[in-house]
Image: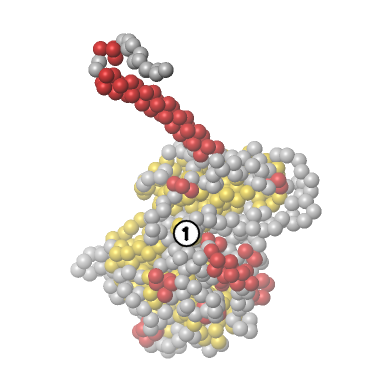
């Protein structure tokens, strides 16, 4: 039997179409249904994918400085047509005729270091040496005088203590700081690596490294009362040997032998000494609470002549036959003359300028002056260009901010040198308004994690958990986070745990917002918090170090913003700024930045410049040196072995 297949009768619209068009219409309908199903599946998968991303564990947000403005000029050096001035964490190159800034060299990324507090010349060499307070010492090449370059860096990790001053004497660069004095040549070169495998071996060397034993360590421990910050002066070569001041006394650095009295001694350049007909001269300061004796000293570390100056003297220089004593309220000038008994200082001439820190000669009538007020050129005597005793081409910068108040949109801050109005995250203006009323900082705050209270001596914070816990039987181990914040270093007890900044500075306030504890102090800001609400440390109610910024301080105020987790700060010598936590994915990833996450390990690295790589072997005795793509952020901070130092 043969079976035949008969076509099924068609119905509807397709029945009126030719057979080919009807088949095409049916196929189109089937594909349309399939596309709708695929679209629904895709939308559902996309929603699931986005939900999974939202719920997936994320790296903790990163504390960043979103904006900063202001700071202090501490030092200025004039070389020919260029003036080199420190400002905040940078070195400015300016024209000595127009005062125009030709170049700004960031010595280390803002937020990772103290301010540039000292700067010296290397005689006979196109080189400067700078100190970032408490952080690092850097050698800077002036091979291209308009574009200085950092050629070598030594941080606290290699030095062994916080550096505060630098000097050049006897053909050596000397680093003075909180625990003594060491020569640059004895400090190890940076611990560098090129990849993760190499980093393991190099970091073992770093952990085993013992910094050089500092000179005058015993004298410092005995005479500074446990607070050596900025009390150790520069080294100078004298008939008594290499000497330096500690407090108000001068010691020979190798033997610790007392040789004279001074709070600071600085060498007079050969050219300036020849102008007054004397060789081997030094300027000196002998500071007391009420004022200071300033003057000239010979190679025997004995006073030649001196005068009393009221207030705090920041610097003394002999320039074109005149001794200039730079104070917080005036620059006091004394002419130098030669009499039967030698050099003598004349009567004082007062140059009214608040907030000066340093002065350098351009000519015998023109000077560069810098300080917390900003920077300016000064014309001493009248000439064809203008009147005498005139500051011109001045640039003011917000600094010396001792009082502040805010409406959370603007901050009015200032002190004896003027008032500044800072539009948060934007610009700042010098305003003619009375000093703001001080907003009382909080010494005790509470959060979901517990309570934090600043100690009576303002050196620590007692943190008590909101939940009861048994007393610990051993001491908490100190650790340093990526920003240099120290975990608590005192024994944990049922009563709480004590946290100290690892720089040892005084604490100025605490605040609790956005689930975090903010602590601001002499050297910056530290933030403790939780990650994803998970208790990271039972002794701290879930708190751990989540961010830290080194800022030239002291940081006096911190104001939470109206929304979000951002905060604005006011630093006495560091100006204004805004800090916030942002997602790591939102961090800039473009090349050429000094501060970046080179190896994507969640911590910040600092990229070295070519000049630093080429100059990494300047001095030092460490044998293992590699050309790096980055270096560990810990190298920018205090030595881990120092605990709460």
Q: How many residues crowd around disc 1 within 10 Å: few (fewer than 14), some, or many (20 or more)?
A: some
Residue at x-position 40% and y-position 82% = 123
- Residue 332 in view (yes/no): no
- Residue 559 in view here: yes
Residue at the (30%, 21%) spot, across then down: 23
Q: Nearer the viewer, residue 589 or 138?
A: 589
The quadrant of the rendering that contains the N terminus is top left
Residue 630 coordinates in the image, percent (x, y): 47, 64
**What residue did someone put label 1 on?**
598
Q: Position of residue 347 (x, y in %)?
A: 41, 73
Who is closer to the viewer here, 361 or 454?
A: 454
Q: Residue at x 64, y 58 (%)?
A: 479
- Position of residue 42 in the picture relative to residue 216 (left or right): left
Q: What kind of element bears circle 1?
A: loop
Give 183 or 231, whichever is nearer the viewer.
183
Residue 549 to residue 377: above or below: above
* 19 in relation to 583, above or below: above
- Specify how the rendered protein is coloured: secondary structure
Q: Nearer the viewer, residue 421 or 610?
A: 610
Outermost residue, left direction? 384
In the rendered image, residue 40, in percent from the top left (x then y), is placed at 43, 27
Task: Farthest residue to the front: give it.
Answer: 1
* Relative to 203, 626 lies left or right: left
Residue 619 rendering spot, x and y as whole percentages: 49, 80
**Residue 251 sits in which quadrant?**
bottom right
**Residue 613: which quarter of the image?**
bottom left
Q: How many marks?
A: 1
* 178 over 374 or under it: above or below: below
Q: Residue at x 43, y 75 (%)?
A: 615
């Amino acid at each position: 039997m043969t079976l035949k297949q008969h076509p099924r009768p068609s119905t509807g619209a397709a029945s009126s179409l030719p057979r080919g068009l009807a088949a095409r219409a049916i196929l189109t309908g089937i594909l349309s249904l399939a596309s709708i199903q695929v679209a629904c599946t895709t939308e559902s998968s996309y929603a699931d994918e986005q939900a999974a991303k939202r719920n997936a564990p994320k790296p903790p947000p990163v504390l960043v400085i979103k904006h900063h403005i202001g700071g202090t000029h501490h030092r200025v050096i004039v070389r020919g047509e260029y003036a080199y001035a420190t400002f905040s964490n940078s070195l400015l190159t300016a024209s000595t005729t127009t005062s125009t800034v030709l170049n700004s060299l960031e010595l280390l990324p803002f937020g990772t270091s103290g301010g540039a507090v000292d700067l010296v010349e290397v005689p006979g060499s196109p080189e400067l040496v700078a100190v970032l307070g408490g952080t690092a010492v850097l050698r800077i090449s002036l091979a291209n005088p308009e574009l200085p370059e950092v050629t070598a860096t030594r941080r606290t990790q290699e030095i062994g203590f916080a550096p505060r001053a630098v000097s050049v004497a006897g053909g050596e660069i000397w680093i003075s700081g909180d625990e003594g004095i060491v020569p640059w040549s004895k400090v190890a070169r940076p611990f560098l690596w090129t990849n993760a495998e190499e980093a393991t071996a190099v970091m073992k060397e770093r952990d085993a490294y013992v910094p050089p034993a500092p000179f005058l360590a015993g004298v410092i421990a005995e005479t500074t009362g446990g607070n050596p910050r900025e009390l150790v002066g520069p080294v100078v070569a004298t008939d008594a040997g290499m000497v330096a001041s500690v407090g108000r006394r001068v010691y020979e650095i190798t033997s610790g032998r007392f040789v004279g009295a001074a709070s600071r001694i600085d060498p007079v350049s050969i050219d300036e000494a020849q102008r007054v007909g004397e060789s081997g001269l030094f300027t000196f300061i002998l500071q007391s609470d009420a004022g200071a004796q300033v003057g000239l000293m010979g190679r025997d570390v004995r006073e030649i002549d001196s005068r009393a100056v009221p207030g705090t003297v920041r610097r003394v220089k002999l320039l074109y036959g005149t001794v200039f004593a730079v104070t917080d309220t005036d620059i006091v000038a004394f002419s130098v003359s030669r009499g039967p008994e030698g050099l003598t200082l004349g009567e004082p001439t007062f140059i009214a300028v608040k907030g000066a820190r340093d002065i350098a000669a351009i000519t015998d009538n023109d000077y560069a002056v810098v300080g917390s007020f900003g920077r300016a050129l000064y014309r001493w005597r009248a000439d064809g260009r203008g009147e005498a005793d005139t500051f011109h081409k001045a640039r003011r910068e917000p600094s010396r901010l001792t009082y502040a108040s805010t409406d959370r949109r603007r901050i009015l801050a200032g002190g004896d040198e003027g008032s500044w109005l800072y539009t948060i995250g934007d610009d700042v203006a010098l305003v003619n308004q009375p000093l703001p009323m001080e907003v009382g900082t909080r010494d005790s705050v509470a959060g979901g994690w517990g309570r934090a209270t600043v100690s009576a001596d303002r050196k620590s914070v007692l943190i008590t958990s909101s939940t009861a816990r048994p007393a610990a039987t051993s001491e908490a181990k100190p650790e340093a986070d990526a920003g240099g914040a120290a975990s608590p270093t005192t024994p944990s007890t049922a009563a709480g745990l004590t946290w100290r900044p690892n720089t040892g500075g005084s604490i100025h306030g605490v605040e609790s917002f956005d689930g975090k504890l903010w602590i601001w102090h002499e050297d910056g800001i530290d933030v403790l918090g939780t990650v994803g609400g998970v208790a990271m440390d039972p002794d701290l109610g879930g708190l751990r170090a989540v961010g830290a910024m080194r800022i030239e301080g002291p940081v006096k105020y911190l104001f939470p913003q109206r929304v979000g987790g951002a905060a604005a700060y006011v630093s006495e010598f560091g100006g204004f700024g805004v800090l916030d936590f942002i997602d790591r994915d939102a961090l800039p990833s473009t090349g050429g930045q000094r501060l970046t996450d080179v190896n994507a390990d969640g911590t910040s690295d600092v990229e070295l410049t070519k000049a630093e790589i080429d100059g990494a072997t300047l001095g030092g005795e460490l044998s293992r040196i590699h050309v790096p793509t980055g270096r560990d952020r810990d190298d920018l901070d205090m030595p881990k072995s120092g605990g709460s130092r």
